[in-house]
Amino acid sequence: MQQHKHFPRLDVLEAIRTRRSIRKYTDMPVEWDKIGTIVDAGRVAPSSGNLQCWRFIVVDSIHKRKALAEACLKQYWMEEAPVHILIVMMLRRIREFYGKRGTDFYAVQEAAMAAQNMMLAAHTVGLGSCFVSAFGYAAEQPQEPIKYRIENITFMNRWAQQNVARMKDIDNIIWNFRVAERGIKFGGDLVNAIDLHTRAGRKRLTEQLKDKAAELKKRVEEGSRKAGP
């Protein structure tokens, strides 16, 4: 499947980091195979007891899109998206198994998990999306919003108002891991490439591998010194 030139296939971590909520869309029609991919991502989301109480409604009618925008607190920007996907929860079924807890909590959680799956899938196939389940080609590229640092929201073993249980400089720990991970991938790519080159080419690539390994080692050591004891 040919992808939009600005949206190549992404791995899951990159998709999580780069997905944005889009509220402006082009009038470019959305391919049905991509819609199918998005709905299928919602289908495989986790659900309580594997009941799979969600159902998905694909809406491309302009009149129904206008009605949906009106119903969603008059969010008229939704009309620009050529396709809406509604997540409908079968409350009677989930109530039979889990009672009020199922309708008050599980149904909402499961719909949200399905929506997150679908938004990530939309992003990986080059489509913009927003949590109200409106999908279309993005006409904007919002900047990354300000987020808390990971050590400000992550605690060890218990919740604490003070800093006593907060993880220290976890960004640096993750950074070192990612540097090593990229080094391993780079080495694997070079090994595969070496098999395709002549002896002279192999020697050149081997030197590149040594230089890259030395560079990564230096960066990891510098990161460790910054982290301190």
Image (cartoon, grey):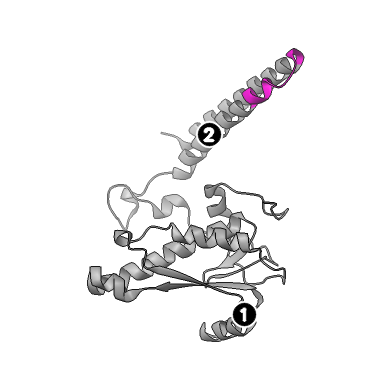
In the picture, measured across the screen, residue 29 lies left or right of residue 113, that is: right
- Quadrant containing the C terminus in the rendered view: top left
- Viewer-proximal residue among 125 and 176: 125
- Viewer-proximal residue among 204 and 94: 94
Picture disc at residue 181: 2
Q: Relative to 165, say whether 209 is above or below.
A: above
Can you tell which of label 1 and label 2 is closer to the viewer?
Answer: 1
The residue located at (52%, 82%) in the rendering is 72
**Residue 196 lies in magenta, yes or no?**
yes
**Residue 208 lies in magenta, yes or no?**
no
Q: Relative to 201, say whether 63 is above or below.
A: below
Residue type at the position of mark 1 = Ser
Which secondary structure class fits the magenta region best?
helix
Q: Mark 2 falls on what kind of element?
A: helix
Q: Residue 190, located in which quarter of the rendered image?
A: top right
Q: Over which residues does the magenta segment extend?
A: 190-200
- Viewer-proximal residue among 166 and 81: 81
Disc 1 target residue: 61
Q: Position of residue 112 (x, y in %)?
A: 43, 66
Q: Position of residue 41 (x, y in %)?
A: 49, 58
CA separation in Å, label 1 and label 2: 46 Å
Q: Position of residue 70 (x, y in %)?
A: 55, 86
Q: Position of residue 74 (x, y in %)?
A: 56, 85
N-terminal-most mark, 1 or 2: 1
Q: Relative to 135, say whether 123 is above or below.
A: above
For disc 2, the neighbor class at 10 Å (few under 14, some 14 to 19, many from 20) is few
Q: Mark 1 falls on what kind of element?
A: loop
Picture disc at residue 184: none
The residue located at (58%, 66%) in the rendering is 129
Residue type at the position of mark 2 = Glu
